[in-house]
Amino acid sequence: MARYDRAITVFSPDGHLFQVEYALEAVRKGNAAVGVRGTDTIVLAVEKKSAPKLQDSRSVRKIVNLDDHIALACAGLKADARVLINKARIECQSHKLTIEDPVTVEYITRYIAGLQQKYTQSGGVRPFGLSTLIIGFDPHTGTPSLYQTDPSGTFSAWKANATGRNSNSIREFLEKNYKETSGQETLKLAIRALLEVVESGGKNIEVAVMTKEHGLHQLEEAEIDAIVAEIEAEKAAAEAAKKGPSTKET
């Protein structure tokens, strides 16, 4: 194995590119990120590590705009993300300048995935150590979209998905609880999914909501705390309702 994990362009005898697999491992150790697509709303929710006391938390954003109608969240190496985000933003503006139309979500997803794949096939470079969740509304039809890309350059469309730390647990939760939602219900589902692996509270979660009319809106800590409190109250009421009949029977 040692001979095959030093060069990005060399396959191992059993068909593995070890540097790509190590990049996927970097993603699995990154912050958890969740994306949920509703009928009129798309939500991104990301685990937020506690910031040092003297740091301005506004300078550390994990959910960013690529264009007015497209946003991105990622899990993995943040420095790599910055490079990829800058390239994607330039491509969005270049497309608008050349074609005189804003990019579609699928177009910019293909562009980002193509960049990630390019860095798995060239000597002297290493793969991007991040996975992305890309959301947006089609500029022509207004249809909401959610895509995921990974370090190998693979991309796919989803109704709801998670990446990063404990993403399998979050995905299982989404598979059990996902249904077509809109507005506040989509937001609650995304936060509930993230709370499966993150301590509750606005300090530990970054949330952004995108609608066709208003674009991307980053929620303030107080807004997140209010929704978390509402979710916990609903959970407590559901548990009390379950216990209620059994106590009457006894």
Image (spheres, grey):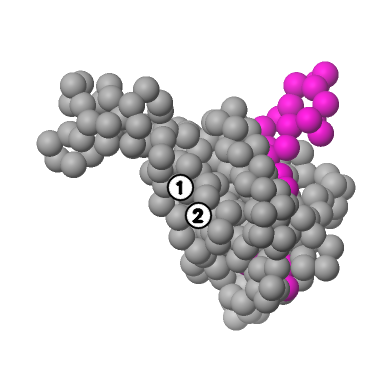
- Residue identified by numbered label 2: 110
Question: To which quarter of the image does residue 85 belong?
Answer: top right
- Residue identified by numbered label 1: 114
Disc 1 from disc 2: Cα separation: 6 Å
> Magenta residues, as a range?
37-65
Badge 2, how many Cα within 10 Å: few under 14, some, many 20+? some
The furthest residue to the left: 13
Image coordinates for residue 159, horizontal then vertical, percent: 55, 68
Left or right: where does residue 54 sit relative to residue 121?
right
The reply to whether the C-beta atoms of the residues labelled 1 and 2 are less than 8 Å apart is yes
Does 31 appear above or below 148? above
The type of residue carrying mark 1 is Gly
- Most foreground residue, 245 or 156: 156
Which residue is rendered at x = 77% and y = 55% of the image?
A: 68
Question: To which quarter of the image does residue 236 belong?
Answer: bottom right
Tell me, yes or no, if residue 173 can be seen here: no
Q: Is residue 52 magenta?
A: yes
- Which structural element holds mark 2? helix
Which residue is rendered at x = 20% and y = 21% of the image?
A: 2
Badge 1, how many Cα within 10 Å: few under 14, some, many 20+? some
- Which structural element holds mark 1? helix
Tell me, yes or no, if residue 179 can be seen here: yes
Image coordinates for residue 17, horizontal then vertical, percent: 27, 36
Which residue is rendered at x = 45% and y = 41% of the image?
A: 116
The type of residue carrying mark 2 is Arg
Left or right: where does residue 120 sit relative to residue 37?
left
Q: Is residue 64 magenta?
A: yes
Image coordinates for residue 13, horizontal then vertical, percent: 12, 36
Does 3 appear above or below 32? above
Q: Dividing the image into 4 quarters, which one contains the C terminus?
A: bottom right
Does 37 appear above or below 245? above
Which residue is rendered at x = 73% and y = 37% of the image?
A: 61
